Structure formats: C-alpha cells, structure tokens
Amino acid sequence: MDSDIVLSLRNLVKRYPGVLALDHVSLDFRKGEVHALLGENGAGKSTLVKVVGGAIEPDSGVIRVNGREFTRMNPHLARSLGIEVIHQEFNLVPPLSVAENIFLGDKVGGRRLVDFKVMRERAVALFQQFNIAIDPDKPVRELSPAQQRLVEIAKAVSKNVRILIMDEPSAPLSVSEVEHMFEIIQRLKQNGVTVIYISHRLEEVFRISDRVSVMRDGRYVATRPTADTNRKELISLMVGRELTEQYPAGTGAPSDVALEIRHLSGNGVRDISFYVRKGEILGLSGLVGAGRTELAMVIFGAAPAEGGEIWVDGKRVTINSPADAIRHGIGLLPEDRKGQGLFLEMGVKWNICFPIVRRISRRGLVDTKAEQEIAAKYKARLDIRTPSLEQRVKNLSGGNQQKVVLAKALAAQSDILIFDEPTKGIDVGTKQEIYKLMRELADNGIAIIMISSDMQELLGMSDRIVVLCEGAFAGEVHREQFSQNYILDLASGTH
Amino acid sequence: MAKVQPFARNIYRSATDFARKYAPLLILTGLVLLFTFISPNFMTVKNLTLMLRQVSFATISAVGIMFVMISGAIDLSIGSQIVFTNIVTAILMVRYHVHPALAILVCLTMGTFLGTMNGVLSVKLQIHPLIITLGTATIYKGLGYIVANGKNIIGLPESFKVFGQGYVGPVPIPVIIMAVVALIGNFVLTRTYFGRYVFAMGGNPEAARLAGVNINKMRVITFAICGFASGITSVLLLSRVFSGQVFTGQGVEFDCLTAALLGGVSFVGGEGTIFGLITGVLIIGVLNNAMQLAGLPDFYQNVVKGTVLLVAVGFDVYQKRRKAKETIARVSS
C-alpha cells in the first residue's frame, strides 16, 4: 500500500429514496497533492464531501484516514483528524470580526474569557504567512466575497488542517482573486496539506491540480494525472460521451439594431453607450465589480438611471420599472437564479407563466388553459426535465432551474434578452443545451446581451464583446480581434 | 424482503406526508371526537351554531390578515382598528342619527383607510410592518379612547341589530357573511392574477419585482384589504354587542394570527390556504366552546390555546425541516 496516501475511501455507498448518490465509490488522495474532483451536477461530489466531512453518514464502506479506519465520520471527529471543508456557501458570522470568526469555537488565551489581544496577534501572524491583507478587526459583513473566502481558508488553516476540501471555492471570485487563492493553495501544498478541489471551471482544474478524478451518476469514473489529460477527455469522461462542438456558430447575419443605450449612467456605472442588433449575441465582459450586473439592472429598470437614453427598435423609451422593460420586450435572466429569478416553493408552470399571468387573465381571472398550454410548450421546447408541470422548482437541478428562468423570459415574448452568467454552477451537459438555445434564439432574430465571467464561454459565444472597467466603458472588441489577453487588458484598465 | 422494504417505506412516507398536509384537519377531527365523547352538550345543532357565530367575527378579519401574511407582512393593528371604527360608527348613529346603511359604509371606508395607512407607512418609511402596525395599533386604539371619551355609546337603532344578532332560517347572519368573505377570499387568492402577485411577493419579493410586480402598490392594497375585512368585523361586533365600547375587538389580531398559523399560513409569506385558515379558526372555536361547556375559567383556556398553537406549529415546522433535509440531500448529491 502506498504510504503517502492520507485519505482513502473504499466502497462508499449512500442511498437516498430513489437515488443512489454514491455507488461503491473508492478513491485515494495523496499527501500534499491538489486533487481536483469533477462531475456534472448530481454526480455525487457534494455527497462525497459531506461523507468525508462528517455531515452525513454513508450506508456502507470505509473511510481510511492516515491508516485509521472509520465507517462513519462526524464533524468533530473529522476536524480532530485535520479534515476541513470550505463549502460553496459562506460559513462565517457576519457581525463578528475577522479574528473572532477565525478562532470561533477555539479557546484562545485565558481559561474562561477570550483574550482578544492574543487572538488578534495570531490572526495577523496567519495573514502574514499567506500574504493576506485584511484588517482582523473588521466585521466580516464589511468584507468582499473574495476576502470572506480568504478568511475561511485562514480559518481552516488555523485548525491545523491536513486535508482541505474546497467545494466550488472560486464561484464568487474574480480572476485576480482566484490567482491569489491559488498562491495560498500552492503554499498549503508545500506544507504537505492535501487539497481536494471541486470546481466546474476546467481552466482552474488545469491550472492548479496535480491529479483529477471524475465522477458520474454517483460512480467513480477515472483518475488522471492532470498533465496527461486534456479538456476534451475530461468533458467526455464527465458526460460519458464525446462532445463534438462546444460553441454553436451563428448564421452571422445580424440585422437592425434592437437595443441601443446612449451615455447611460446610474447604479454605479457611468456614461455607457453600445448597441445590440437582432440576431446577435453581445458579450459583456469585465472583472467582478466592473458594473456589468449593475448596468443590466439599469437597462431593465430595476435600478434608477441617472442619465442617458435607452432606445428600443429605433424609438427612445422611458424605463422606470421592470414592468416598463418587460413591456418594451426586454427580458432579464438574473445571475442569482434562486434569489432573483425563481419562486422556489411554487411549481414549474406557476413560475413560467408568472410574468405573463396578468396578460393571460380575463377580468382578473387567470386563464388556466392558456397557462397549461404555454408551460407545456416551453417545457417541450427547452427540454425542461421535470416529472410534472406542478413540480416545485426547488426540487429541480440547477440546469433545469435555469431553463425555467429562460422559459419565463421567452413566455413573456421578449425580443431582447439579457443573460447574466447563464451557465454559472451548471453542469457541462446542460451548458451545451443552453448555448445551443441561446444561438437558436439569436438565429430567430432575438438580440442577446450575455454577461459572463467565463472567458472561454465569452469568446466562444459572443459575436461582439463590450468590456467594462470600474463602471465605465473600456472598449468594444469584434470577433476577428478576439483574444483573452486583449480583453483582460481592457477589463483591468491596463490598455 | 428487498422488495417489501421500499414498499413499506413508501407507505410510511405517504402516511407522514398525509399527516403533515392535513395535520390541522386531523387535530380538529380529534378534538371534535374527543368532546363529543366527553360532553353530551357538544354535538348539538344549537351548540355548533353558537360556536360558528362565535368564531365568525374573528374569521372575517383573519381572511384579511391572510392576504397580508401571504404577501410577507403582518398586521398587529386589527383589534385597534376595530376599537376606533366601532366607536366612530356608534357615535355617528347615536349622536348624529346617521342612517345605519350610511354608517356601515363609513365604517368600511374607515377600516379600509386605516389599513391603507399601514401599507403607505410601511412603503414610505421602509420599516418592517410588524413595527409599523405596532405603532399604528397604539395610535388607533388611543384615538378610539379619545373619541369615546370614557363613555359607552348606547341607544343604537333597532334596525341595526339584525347584522350581528339576526338569522336567516337557522343560520346566524355573521356566519353567512363569514362564508361569503371566505369564499371571495379563496377565489381571489387562487383564481386571479392578483392572488398570484400576493403569493409571489411573499415567496420571493425580489423575483416578483423583477417580474414586473409593483411591490409597493401591492403592499398598500393588501393592507387595505385587511382593513376592509376588519371594517366588516367591526360592523358585526357593534351590532352584536349593541353598544359602542372601547373593549370591543381588542386582541382580535391574536386570534386571527393564531388561527392562521394553526391553519398552516406561513409567518414569512408565500404560503397559505383559506381551507387551512378555516380549519385553524374551527380548532380555536371548538376549544373555546368545549372549555366553556366544561366551565373552565378563562385563564386556563388561554394556557390550553397557547399550548395547542405551539404543538401544531412546532409539528409543522419539524416536518418541513425533515422534508427539506431529505430534499437537499437528494438534490445536492
């Protein structure tokens, strides 16, 4: 047996009603390696993490940590073995200070009372070690998402972590912030810490990991040294088939201008002008905080404009509320699907028809027949996988939830669609479907604005890209000039 | 064996699902059976009719508060609204000899106005409706006391008696009005786009806003509906008590809240049915009635009512949490 294997999983099984979440999964993790875990939504990654972290108990199988065998974990035991999990969602206490959060649950200083001075010093020492510039006295709620993530990593390190599990840690981070996180991961690795890295972003996997394991439908599929594999192989391992073309090409015949904004300001963006034509996908690029979502909110009437003009189909329009925008044929698919796009407790049909429920009402009464027809139509057209139209949206997968959001916008017969991070947190297979749908919509004459932080997606899907930097217009790039470096230069204001 | 197990589990799950969905109804049935068994005076037409009339007043307000609760807000001022409108309506009829029909119209308009004020203040001040209505409750009640000036207003016209005390055949008029209000409420909530908007703004206000719903306008309208419903309750109570008293209606909001929560209306919005509400109302009604029959003093009744509320809501929340855990585990695997 390999002596440098710190964590070994043997034949783990976890069954939920109707689903085999883990199907005899066996996996080994070596000391001091960054081991990426890949898989579509529902592949079993999160369940695996929860089993190792002690959040849930497996039905059978063995977890071997440093040669000691366990049939189940609990959070306390996991921590005492040096296992720390950083979850997708933040697990900090917002009103407490950074230092207090890091040492939460630990005894620092005196026997009964907390010694804040010692705590502060330790936090400073920890931050110095990893080159983190955060004031330890600041309340966590005042930190940016990136800073909060760094605090979570520091917190894990302070617990003498030996095995660090990170579940989609880069989701809220910008490119430069991800770089910083990678530096920290490198340093942890040098200290012999094993990092299990779960991400949907393949670039990150190639950038940081030593080995990569793929899961599919609750089963272990394969492990490869990262250096010996490529994007294509990993994707086909994840979806179980070869994906021929990643980004569907357009017919390349955009016609009239559908939406034009002139010198638009407000909600933190200023003096932005661009246009998008029917049949065109306009990418909107920029770093986190560049004001892309903020701009979308102004166009959609969800945040007040302070100046400038919006033109739809060659006519100047006034948009003071989302209702105005919808009336002018503008649809928004918000970044935060669950928080802004969906009514999770309500059914698929209810959600799809909500924006038009007034339109399909006669004398206030909802026409349930029309509602049924419209919902069924978009369920079929977008291939929304749900057992019934009454199914609560919260029980659907992320990809299918996104399709419901799309169906909402389509049912409202929007001519201009703003997609804000359309594939965030969505598995590879469904991503392909969404790309195809977006291209189909464009080919049918719809004008699309796509906000994305995924550079591959942006370059692959867009016909043109507008770059924002710190709330201002930074440049417009045409297809023939597309290059990652050029766009990043514009976005970071170095051009 | 391997085949039997999932089958048995399915039966168990559908049984618990059923119990969760119909928990209030099961409790009600249990109580009715229990009291029928214990007290021979309980299961009589006369007693049940009385019981229905007793709950009818609060139920009408409860339908109003349900719109507010489903929209994600709360109204603690219902009782105080009734105190105020009650006194004013009584004074109009007694001192100024206003025709009862006109006085009723004034009462309903005034209730609607007081509710509207709650909504407008919530929207303008951007303070949680709990605090807004706690404030207006104190104001409305204070105004009622000022107008009453320490007196009971007696000498209402005889023709006004019918609303709270009259019968159509064997059925008391307040019960009929309650049924009509509940049916209309149910219709609006389940069949109209307006009802959808109410559920939407309670379930996810931001998503509702982005879907084009004017949240502020809806907030004012739902409070206005609640005020209107309380106006109806006020008219009926005035007619039933048959004198204007500042104690009429006080604390009704807590009966309404208890009934709504017992009936599965969510405290944070987005959920609730009239059917559940009526079940909740009847649970309270049956408990009150049976304890009165048993001659239990008021204080004990309060303890029992409070306990039933905690048990019922606690059971519901426990079930939901368990269900949520299962779903999360299943979806995020």
Image (cartoon, grey):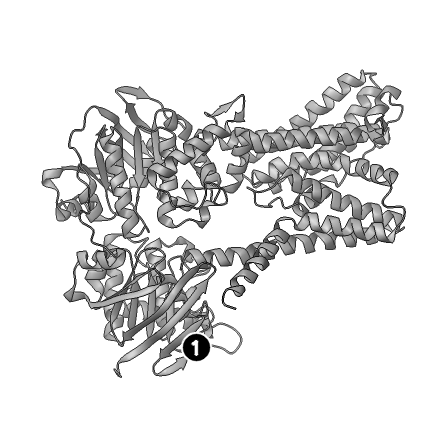
The residue drawn where x is 65% and y is 48% is B22
Residue B244: in sight, yes or no? no
Q: Residue furthest left?
A: A480
As rendered, which of A129 and A447 lies closer to the eye? A447
Q: Could you tell me residue B24's position as x and y percent?
A: 68, 48
The residue drawn where x is 26% and y is 58% is A238
As rendered, which of A324 and A243 lies closer to the eye? A243
Task: Tell me the residue that label 1 is attached to.
Answer: A71
The residue drawn where x is 63% and y is 38% is B66
In the rendered view of the protein, which quadrant contains the C terminus of chain A?
A: top left
Q: Quadrant of residue B184?
A: top right
Residue B143 relative to residue B95: left or right: left
Query: How many numbered circles are shown?
Result: 1
Give the answer, above or below, for where B214 lies relative to A246: above
Within 10 angstroms of label 1, few (less than 14), some, or many (20 or more) residues? some
Give the answer, above or below, for where A2 lies relative to B54: below
Residue B305 relative to residue B63: left or right: right
As rendered, which of A337 and B13 lies closer to the eye? B13
Q: Could you tell me residue A218's position as x and y percent?
A: 35, 62
Q: Quadrant of residue B190?
A: top right
Q: Tell me the SS state at disc 1.
A: loop
Residue B233 relative to residue A14: left or right: right
In the rendered view of the protein, which quadrant contains the N terminus of chain A?
A: bottom left
Q: Could you tell me residue B9's position as x and y percent?
A: 55, 61
Give the answer, above or below, for where B265 lies relative to A220: above
Q: Could you tell me residue A370's position as x and y percent?
A: 46, 28
Label 1 chain ID: A
- In the image, what residue type sits under mark 1? Thr
Residue A347: in sight, yes or no? yes
As rendered, which of A380 and A441 lies closer to the eye? A380
